[in-house]
Image (tube, rainbow, N blue to C red):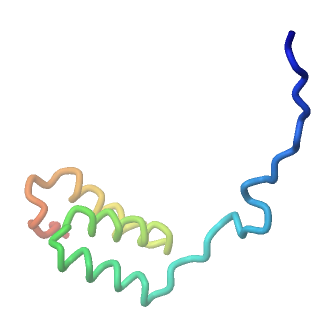
């Protein structure tokens, strides 16, 4: 016959842990990320990072220009036409 298993409640994974929305990046952290992306020649990633930062700060015009440049450019080293 089958034995009955007694239910033992498990402790939640997030008990006594801070969960939820994270703090926004500080200006020093933003520039550190930008510099590292430039040093490693990750131009496409840098453009996307700048796009995300610009969208968050409300500069939608620059973000739109960067987005259209990133989606239409063949080479990532080319400068956007403003």
Image-based side of 18 in relation to 27, left or right: right
Q: Residue at point 22% right, 62% down? A: 44
Most extreme residue toward the front, as rendered?
A: 1
Image-based side of 12 in relation to 32, left or right: right
Q: Residue at point 8% right, 58% down? A: 75
Image-based side of 60 in relation to 64, left or right: right
Q: Residue at point 82% right, 47% down? A: 10
Tell which of 28 and 50 is nearer to you.
Answer: 28
Query: Eyeballing the image, is 71 above or below 16?
Result: above
Query: Eyeballing the image, is 51 above or below 33?
Result: above
Tell which of 9 and 38 is nearer to you.
Answer: 9
- Where does the image place residue 60, in percent across and percent down from the top left? 42, 66
Tell which of 55 and 81 is nearer to you.
Answer: 55
- Where does the image place residue 1, in percent across and percent down from the top left? 86, 9
Classify the position of the C terminus by image quarter: bottom left
Q: Residue at point 87% right, 28% down? A: 5
Most extreme residue toward the bottom, as rendered?
A: 28
Image-based side of 80 in relation to 55, left or right: left
- Where does the image place residue 64, in percent across and percent down from the top left? 34, 61
Tell which of 7 and 45 is nearer to you.
Answer: 7
Query: Eyeballing the image, is 27 above or below 40?
Result: below
- Where does the image place residue 33, in percent across and percent down from the top left? 34, 78
């Amino acid at each position: 016959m089958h034995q009955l298993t007694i239910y033992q409640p498990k402790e939640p994974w997030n008990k006594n842990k801070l969960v939820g929305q994270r703090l926004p990046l500080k200006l020093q952290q933003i520039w550190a990320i930008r510099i590292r992306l430039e040093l490693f020649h990750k131009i496409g990633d840098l453009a996307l990072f700048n796009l995300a930062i610009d969208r968050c700060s409300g500069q939608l015009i620059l973000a739109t220009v960067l987005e259209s440049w990133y989606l239409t450019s063949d080479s990532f080293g080319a400068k956007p036409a403003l």
